[in-house]
Amino acid sequence: MADAPDSGALPADFLPSVLLQSGRPALILPHAGEFAAVGRTVLVAWKESREAARAVSSALPWLRRARQVHVISYGEAAAESLQKLAGYLKIHGVTADAHKGGPEEDDIGNLLLSRAADVGADLLVMGCYGHSRAREWVMGGATRTLLQTMTIPVWMSH
């Protein structure tokens, strides 16, 4: 029915499907707020994974134009991992401030949003983690949290 209230709504699994099956990065905007400027101050959520590497490499045009780039990683090997990322970014003309996020925790999504607010980020770059199980999309914890509660635009790649 054309006049049904939900007739223009997207299916609940639309965004996870696009992120996980398209093979392309996506700029995702929060459902509320105004974003006059995106990409002036960027926070990169780093994890040594294929997904994060794809997100960073596809975001290089944004990172090169940014006034400030911050990178953050969690876990025991964060310092070494951030050093490698900073070297990669430097080769591509990007200077980044590294932030060791602390131990790997369950609530990384909210920690990322908090750090983004702390550094004044207007764009978050991160890998998208998830898989399909019996036709139900199951997203990784940080990915799920960000998609549900994001407060700034997020550049994601799977």
Image: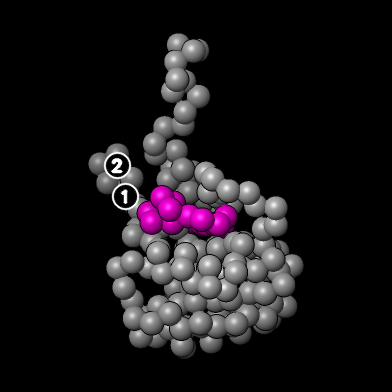
Q: Amino acid at mark 2?
A: Glu
Q: Horizontal and vertical percent for residue 129?
A: 40, 58
Q: Does the segment drawn in magenta span residue 36?
A: no
Circle number at residue 138: 1
Q: Does the segment drawn in magenta span residue 157?
A: yes
- 111 to the left or right of 57: left
CB under 8 Å between discs 2 and 1: yes
Secondary structure beneath label 1 = strand
- 74 to the left or right of 89: left
Badge 1: residue crowd in 10 Å (few <14, some 14–19, many ≥20):
some
Magenta stretch: give its range: 144-158
Q: Is residue 84 above or below residue 3?
A: below
Q: Horizontal and vertical percent for residue 21?
A: 46, 46
Residue pictured at 48% horizontal, 48% vertical: 19
Q: Residue furthest left?
A: 134
Q: Is residue 79 above or below residue 5?
A: below
Residue pictured at 57% horizontal, 73% vertical: 119
Tell which of 153 and 46 is nearer to you. Answer: 153
**Residue 70 falls in image quadrant:** bottom right
Q: Amino acid at mark 1?
A: Val
Residue at label 2?
A: 136
Q: Horizontal and vertical percent for residue 9?
A: 47, 28
